[in-house]
Amino acid sequence: MKDKKSKIKNYLKDFPESDEIAQKLIDRCLFIRFLEDRIERNKLKNLLENRDVKGFLDLFDYYNDCLNGDLFEEGDIPTNINKQILVELNEIFGKHYKYKDNQIALVPYQFDKIPILLISHIYENLLKRKKRNSEGIVFTPENVVDYTIDEVFKSEFLKNKIENNNIRVLDPSCGSGIFLAKFFKRMVKEKKIGSQDIHKKSDLLQKSIYGIDINPTALRIAAFSLYLEIFDGLPPEIIKKEVIEKYEAGGEHFMFPGLKEKHLFNWNNVPGVDSEKLLKFLNNNLKIEWAENADIKKSDDGKSITINKDSNSLIIKLIGEKNKTILEINGVGSPEYILKEENGELNTYKENNLINRNSLFEDNIFKDEKFDLILGNPPWSYKEFSEDEKRKIKEKWPDVSNYDSSQCFLFKIEDWMDEDNMVGMVVNLSNFTNQNALIFRKSFLEKYSLDKFLNLINIKKITFGSGSEPACVLIFNKNHGVEKNDIGFIIPDMTQFSELTEAVRQL
Ligand SMILES: C[S@@+](CC[C@H](N)C(=O)[O-])C[C@H]1O[C@@H](n2cnc3c(N)ncnc32)[C@H](O)[C@@H]1O
């Protein structure tokens, strides 16, 4: 697949974002194959076979329109891509999957039989080794995720909360969303939501699952995996009837909930090329219907935009230090939006469940919000912090040793925790063994109440791999009750069945 990606990239070399476009084409095809194989459709396969570039790009708009307005961003794949790209994609996603040396496989991939989590594996595989190392991207093995989630579900407190309410779960470095997707699946089961109840699943997803990652591709994959979880276990006829046929007949039909942070408009380009985007947003999202064709003016200092039509008017103000946009409608106060500085320009976003940001250094992410559970596997021993970031680490978390990234994450998450909230995190074991991490450990144990410590050192082979850095799983909270000093310390060992089952279990 990596080889295919570089071939596709080569056909896109005239476009500045060739890597991003190649990646998008592959992960969109992957998503569509997962879906079409479930509903026994061959649209993608036929378009690839016929090298129909227009039909192929239109298929993205079709699914976007049918399933959710932000499944695939509109207009971000050039319309004049080379036909040869479809030849390459056809060899992976077409009727006859070809593997090495152009041999046609006897059994083409059937994506409906492949676990959804394969999406994440493919994503990790496609990333360049350099990028993987520099951003600390390591896919968490399924058995470690399962163990962590099982442990979390042992908490009666959390279990009751899940049964009776919608809890909010955050993965602050969610990658392609394995923790979130698996937790969501488990929650659906615990809440006894039927696999056919897509509306309930969708509602639960939107109310409960939150993720942050610095890498936009990872978030795209996380959204795909979560969306596919909604359809998991659903008979093909229902998807066809409730979604596709109703959509094609122009009727009300099921749509995936919006998960990704939404780009609204570029502040610098209003008035200008983004004026229409702004007016569309006001009309569609905030139901300000009069905004259509309204006049737009920006103040001389560039800090507010006024929108006028007949006797109606509203003001959008930049408030605070580039991190908030306040929308003031006819003097009545109102919602806040996120403003990000990108390539010297200001972009406005609507915060949502999956957020593309730096969890460590941007303070306004889920500001003042608390989560019932924090799960994840933050980057370990990441070594490429800028001087400015190092200065911030020293200032914010002086007890972090050697600028260790997972230690920063362990301290950062405190912002999103209350006394009762739980954490299940996978980090490098060296945080708890290295001599120079002594101050970190002291501070960690003072701040939190460690409930379980699972040392994975002896089962590296069936978890992160023999050559990897040893890891551990931490289950903790901030509840400094009587049992604060009672820590469950577990070191699982390989047994003769370990390699066969790959199960991480307490013995
Ligand atoms: C070790 S991977 C784990 C991914 C995922 N949680 C999993 O278990 O498969 C770490 C993730 O952290 C992301 N990341 C690295 N630095 C980050 C930062 N400062 N803020 C948010 N995400 C970050 C990377 O893009 C990567 O997806």
Image (tube, rainbow, N blue to C red):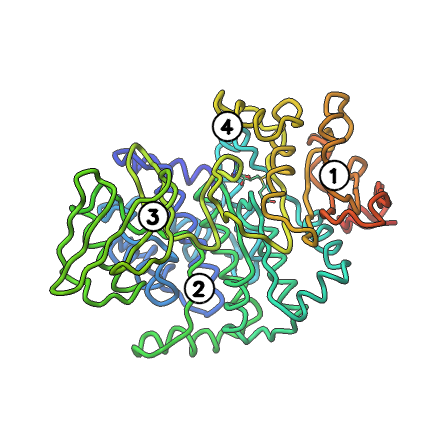
Q: Which residue is mark 1?
A: 472
Assign a secondary structure to mark 4: helix
Question: For the residues marked 2 and 4, what is the alpha-carbon distance in whole angstroms?
Answer: 34 Å
Q: Is residue 115 left or right of residue 221?
A: right
Instruction: Give the amino acid at mark 1.
Output: Cys
Q: Nearer the viewer, residue 204 or 96?
A: 204
Closer to the chain start, of discs 2 and 1, is 2
Q: Position of residue 453 (x, y in %)?
A: 79, 42
Assign a secondary structure to mark 2: loop
Q: Position of residue 360 (x, y in %)?
A: 53, 36
Closer to the chain start, of discs 1 and 3, is 3
Q: Are marks 2 and 1 in contact (CB under 8 Å)?
A: no
Q: Are marks 1 and 3 in contact (CB under 8 Å)?
A: no
Q: Is residue 120 above or below residue 247?
A: above
Question: For the residues marked 2 and 3, what is the alpha-carbon distance in whole angstroms?
Answer: 24 Å
Assign a secondary structure to mark 3: strand
Q: Is residue 160 left or right of residue 342?
A: right
In the image, which is nearer the foreground, mark 3 or mark 4? 3
In the image, which is nearer the foreground, mark 4 or mark 1? 1
Q: Which residue is mark 2?
A: 257
